[in-house]
Image (cartoon, grey):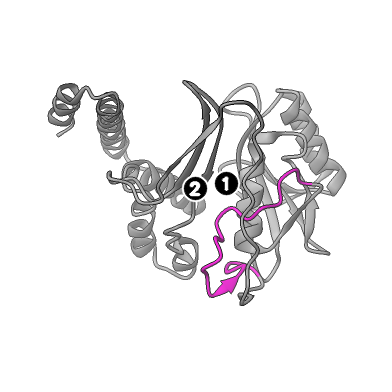
Amino acid sequence: MPQIADLLPKGKPVEGHRPWPRAEVTADTWQNVAHELACGRATLLGLWGEGAPKPAVHMAIMGEQAAQIAVVTIGFPDGGFPSIGALHPPAVRLERAIFSLYGLEPIAAPDTRPWLDLGFWDVRYPLGASSPAPTTRADYTFLPVEGESLHQVAVGPVHASIIEPGHFRFTAGGETVARLEQRLGYVHKGIESLMAGATIERAAQLAGRTSGDSTVAYSIAFAHAVEAALKVAPPPRAQYLRALMAELERLANHLGDIGAICNDASFALMHAHCGILRE
């Protein structure tokens, strides 16, 4: 992807970043990357923050091929960074999460509502320059919906399955869903903070507990990060076992979800069969 490759030399390369190159870039280069995403010439793989002692935001991008992956980093002399979501809407929720956790503000963002801080934390910006939470919080404003014969269905935050809590507000007109809004963060576990300073063994346990239905996926991702940092190549047997476990996890999740969809449509017998197959 020449458009992305040409951007990295304009930044300051970060030595020792593996397995993909990383560069510290200016606000102009950061926005140029946003344009590449908006035009569909690159794919956004991740957008996350970093706290003290040097606040920053990192963005992982991929070109036309999987081998064309890079990370760009922008620092914060004044606590803000140009919004990626202003040009590329899939980044909006990630930017809202960055602000809730780190207090790093996306400048000119189309949606500035908190994403994870629902108003019951003891501190603001727990992974950044944390401070005591205010005693009063503003009410959360759901996006307006206009139209005739609309009704709302609120689901959650408590669910009857093993999925984590989340509030889902459906606005529908008959069978047509005019808008769906979600609120997450009811059980933020602080894994990022627990990871800091942990041993590799302890961090591996934490990674596997990030999400109950993706233990293998998160564990493999963490193993890849450690191996890249230490320049360690796993043996072939480990690679085969990882592939096998990842496929079993994928199948189990698909069977569970298909059964749950059938159950939602009152097809309980199919739900039961999927449950047997999943086990």
Mark 2, other Cα within 10 Å: few <14 / some 14–19 / many ≥20: some
Foreground pick, 186 / 33 = 186
Q: Can residue 188 be seen in this view?
A: yes
Q: Is residue 267 above or below residue 20?
A: above
Label 1 with label 2: CB-CB less than 8 Å: yes
Residue 191: image quadrant is bottom left
Question: What residue is disc 2 on?
Answer: 228
Give the residue drawn at x 51%, y 53%. 229
In front: 247, or 121?
121
- Give the residue at mark 1: 18
Q: How crowded is mark 1: few (under 14 residues within 10 Å), some or many (20 or more)?
A: some
Camera-side residue of 85 and 64:
85
| Residue positioned 43% across, 48% down in the render | 166
The image quarter in which residue 209 lies: bottom left
Residue 26 percent across, percent down from the top left: 84, 49
226 to 119, vertically: above or below: above
Q: Which of marks 1 and 2 is nearer the N terminus?
A: 1
| Marks 1/2: CA–CA distance | 6 Å
